[in-house]
């Protein structure tokens, strides 16, 4: 990677347009979490925002959700911060994606497994979610960044992607989505991370939500927590969310 100091923001599984528990307030929560992440990117003047899949919760977001997303991404465009992304398992499996529409509006770039995005001589590749039992990663040059939206067997036994496959990649950084909890580990000379989701998509996700701020000068990670709605858990009577 480049020797000059650069920072990127890694997030995933924003699942915009989730109307959780039938509550409109939860739909708003998911969009607000994304705006927080955008504000963090602007505050730290990152060189790029990298989204590792599942920008929207499904292929039919509402006009309100689209409008809020466009407004958030426009802030990045105004600051000349590229928004780089891949599609996840919540996207439609084939055909035109919302990420393509955002790219047509010059608000985002859909990463490719074959043609890298050049971020100041740092090649960044992306692999959209694959509906397969086993995954073969694209061949990438050494010291590149690879973005995927897959479960790895380290965090999920019934995963599509194995650590063995990851170990065979030349990528220096592998930034992941699909697993909604934060995780960071080293595999040989590689650094691998899940940023986790930006909002709680299910009641099992009790941990605080966060995004990754990554310094490409020394590969250091700073986990920045998001202010999301608090949930109160009662293992006897169930759970409820605070107002």
Image (tube, grey):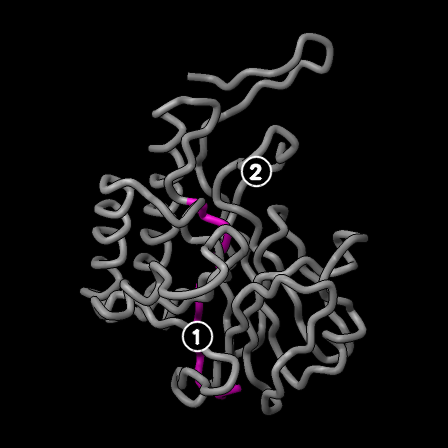
Residue under label 1, please give it.
111
17 vs 29, nearest the viewer:
17
Residue for point 61% across, 71% down: 174
Judged from the image, the secondary structure of the residue bearing numbered disc 2 is loop
143 horizontally vs 33: left or right: right
Which image quarter is the C terminus in?
top left
Residue 44 percent coordinates (x, y): 36, 61
Mark 2 and mark 1 lie on one chain; the one further toward the N terminus is: 1
Judged from the image, the secondary structure of the residue bearing numbered disc 1 is loop
Residue 138 percent coordinates (x, y): 61, 82
Judge whether residue 239 is colored magenta.
no
138 horizontally vs 1: left or right: right
Q: Residues within 10 Å of mark 2 (few under 14, many from 20)?
A: some
User: Which region of the structure is painted magenta?
Assistant: 1-15
Residue most toward the left? 78
177 vs 75, nearest the viewer:
177
160 vs 37, nearest the viewer:
160
């Amino acid at each position: 990677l480049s020797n000059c100091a650069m920072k990127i923001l890694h997030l995933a599984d924003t699942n915009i347009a989730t109307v959780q528990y039938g509550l409109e307030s939860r739909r708003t929560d998911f969009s607000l979490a994304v705006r927080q992440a955008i504000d963090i990117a602007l505050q730290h003047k990152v060189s790029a925002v990298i989204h590792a899949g599942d920008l929207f919760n499904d292929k039919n977001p509402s006009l309100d959700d689209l409008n809020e997303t466009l407004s958030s991404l426009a802030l990045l465009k105004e600051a000349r911060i590229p928004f780089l992304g891949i599609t996840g398992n919540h996207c439609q499996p084939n055909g035109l994606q919302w990420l393509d529409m955002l790219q047509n509006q010059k608000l985002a770039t859909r990463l490719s497994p074959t043609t890298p995005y050049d971020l100041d001589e740092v090649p960044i590749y992306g692999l959209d979610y694959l509906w397969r039992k086993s995954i073969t990663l694209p061949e990438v040059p050494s010291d590149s960044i690879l973005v995927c939206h897959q479960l790895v067997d380290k965090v999920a036994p019934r995963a599509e992607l194995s650590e063995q496959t990851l170990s065979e990649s030349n990528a220096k950084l592998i930034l992941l989505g699909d697993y909604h909890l934060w995780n960071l580990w080293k595999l040989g000379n590689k650094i691998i991370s899940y940023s986790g989701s930006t909002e709680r998509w299910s009641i099992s996700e009790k941990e605080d939500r966060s995004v990754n701020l990554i310094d490409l000068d020394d590969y250091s990670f700073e986990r920045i927590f998001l202010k999301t709605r608090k949930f109160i858990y009662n293992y006897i009577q169930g759970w409820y969310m605070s107002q």
